[in-house]
Amino acid sequence: MCVKCDYTIHRASHHFGWNRDFEPALTAKPGSTIHFECLDSSGGQFDANSTVEHVKTLDFGKVNPVTGPVYVEGARPGDALKITLRHFEPSGLGWTANIPGFGLLADQFKEPALHIWKYDAASMAPALYGPVEVEGALFSIGDTHAAQGDGEVCGTAIESRMDVEATIELVKDARLESPRFTTPGPVTRHLDEAGYEVTTGVGSDLMTAARESVMRMVDL
């Protein structure tokens, strides 16, 4: 339990997909720090004893649960949320799978595979800025990863159940076109210690998304 948090949302309060009609798990004032209990992307279908046989029976109707949503008082379309990720409390157990028909090279890797990981904790405090598109923002967190390679090319990372402490602030009339984030330091020990400002792009193809990201950096 987070003693410095204003609220806790337990992992039972999760949903699948996004819908403005979902009932909020809680209503919070801007500036609140919330403890989110997040399931792994399988929704708890894998554990330390899972084998490749469990990959074959994975229920895709239960994947990628997210904890929430949080109704942020005063948030309106055109505003932005600043989400500062204060702390991650990992479970210490994760999984990576090759799921038939899933991933960039699905035609070359047709057999299921599963690897169970054990890992130590690591943490920093990046801040995500996301555009508000519905009243109250309806913010949720989920699909937590202990680590991820560039591109998540097999379709999974080190998928792991995790608790997340996040502070939600409201930026009025921000008019963000797409999410962006900042880091307080290097994303690995090999990179710039000063941190980064990062913009993102979303589009129907890679070139459209790349152009969108660069235009957002010019705006910034």
Image: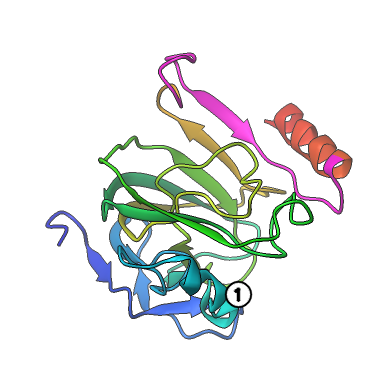
Measured as percent of width and height from the top left, residue 174 is found at 61, 47
Toward which corner of the image does residue 122 lie, by quadrant? Answer: top left
Identify the magenta region.
187-206
* Quarter of the rendering occupied by the N terminus: bottom left
Q: Residue at x 48, y 13 (%)?
A: 192
Q: Identify the image's colour scheme: rainbow, by chain, secondary structure or one colour.
A: rainbow
Query: For mark 1, what is the residue?
Result: 18
User: Considering only vertical position in the picture, is 137 above or below 204?
Assistant: below
Magenta includes 103?
Answer: no
Q: Residue 144: in sight, yes or no?
A: yes
Could you say where residue 101 lies in the image, as x and y percent from the top left? Answer: 72, 65
Quadrant in the picture for residue 94: bottom left
Q: Is residue 69 at all visible to an observer of this figure?
A: no
Task: Report the front residue among 98 and 120.
Answer: 98
In the image: residue 105, left or right of residue 171: right
Q: Is residue 87 left or right of residue 64?
A: left
Relative to 175, residue 56 above or below: below
Q: Amino acid at mark 1?
A: Trp
Label 1's element?
Answer: loop
Main SS category, magenta section: loop
Q: Is residue 189 magenta?
A: yes
- Residue at horizontal 56%, vertical 28%? 197
Q: Which residue is depicted at the point 50% across and 33% down? A: 182
Q: Quadrant of the C terminus?
A: top right
Image side of residue 110 versus residue 43, left or right: right
Where 95 falls versus 147 (above or below)?
Answer: below
Residue sitting at the far left: 3
Q: Looking at the picture, how far across and down is residue 58, in whole percent?
A: 53, 76
Q: Residue at x 73, y 32 (%)?
A: 219
Front in this rendered view, residue 35 or 100: 100
